[in-house]
Image: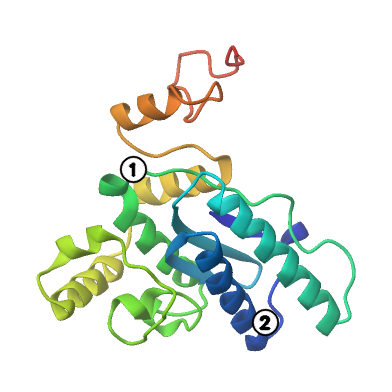
């Protein structure tokens, strides 16, 4: 999930803003039964990786969080106007193929932006909680993290190496396109299963298959 500031304007003006956002994220994640696996708070956008218990969990969380945070920011910083660039953008990913890669993608946002040299240098992400440097109470590790090692130290070390090794260009491009266009990520069986649930196309068509034609309802 990605949510950006309107016209790419800043959505955080201070550390207190970021603390408030995370406090309300924690509150609404608990209220709407949504597990937060990873996050990063950039200057003008946020990324969240979540697993909801129900179909309306994420929409309810994002609506409540977005409204409350915008009202607070406008009040304390004496600002007016729209904060968010429309509705947040979201997509579905196949856990066993893309979850760890997606987490690394989120952690590496500040590195790609030139804000820090390494992911662990950035304060406003979930990365430190996965490498044993910080406890973030509302973070729920996904079960796939257990595949990285038999002990907490082994898992922390393995995850740190995973992020430090960076992302392959094709994975980075896939995740970026997926985040901004809403395409699902997964193997053919995963995509086919999702497509049976909705008339909306869940992934882009392959080249040469009439990509500009509308999908029939």
- Residue 114 in view here: yes
Against 60, is 153 above or below?
A: below
The residue tagged with tag 2: helix, strand or loop?
Answer: helix
Rendered residue at 29%/27% (across/down): 189
Q: Position of residue 199 (x, y in %)?
A: 55, 21
Taking depth in this image into account, of 159 and 129 the one nearest to the observer is 129
On screen, residue 195 versus residue 181, left or right, reads: left
Q: Which residue is mark 1?
A: 94
Q: In the rendered structure, which disc, 2 or 1, sits on the residue that comes first in sequence?
A: 2
Q: Which residue is mark 2?
A: 17
Q: Position of residue 105 (x, y in %)?
A: 40, 60
Rendered residue at 34%/37% (across/down): 186
Rendered residue at 36%/86% (across/down): 134
On screen, residue 142 versus residue 139, left or right, reads: left
Q: Which quarter of the rendering shows the C terminus?
A: top right
Among the 4 quarters of the image, the one containing residue 32: bottom right
Q: Residue furthest left?
A: 150
The residue tagged with tag 1: helix, strand or loop?
Answer: loop
């Amino acid at each position: 999930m990605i949510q950006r500031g309107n016209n790419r304007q800043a959505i955080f003006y201070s550390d207190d803003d970021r603390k408030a956002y995370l406090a309300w994220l924690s509150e609404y994640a608990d209220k709407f039964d949504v597990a937060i696996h990873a996050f990063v708070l950039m200057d003008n956008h946020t990324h969240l990786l979540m697993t909801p218990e129900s179909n309306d969990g994420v929409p309810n969380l994002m609506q409540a969080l977005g409204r409350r945070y915008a009202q607070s920011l406008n009040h304390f910083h004496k600002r007016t106007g729209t904060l968010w660039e429309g509705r947040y953008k979201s997509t579905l990913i196949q856990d066993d193929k893309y979850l760890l890669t997606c987490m690394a993608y989120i952690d590496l946002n500040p590195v790609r932006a030139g804000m820090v040299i390494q992911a662990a240098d950035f304060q406003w992400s979930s990365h430190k909680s996965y490498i044993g440097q910080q406890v973030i109470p509302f973070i729920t590790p996904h079960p796939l993290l257990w595949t990285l090692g038999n002990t907490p130290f082994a898992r922390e070390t393995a995850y740190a190496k995973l992020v430090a090794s960076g992302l392959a260009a094709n994975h980075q491009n896939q995740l970026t396109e997926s985040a901004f266009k809403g395409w699902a990520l997964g193997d053919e069986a995963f995509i086919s299963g999702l497509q049976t649930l909705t008339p909306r196309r869940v992934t882009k068509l392959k080249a040469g298959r009439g990509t500009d034609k509308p999908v029939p309802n």
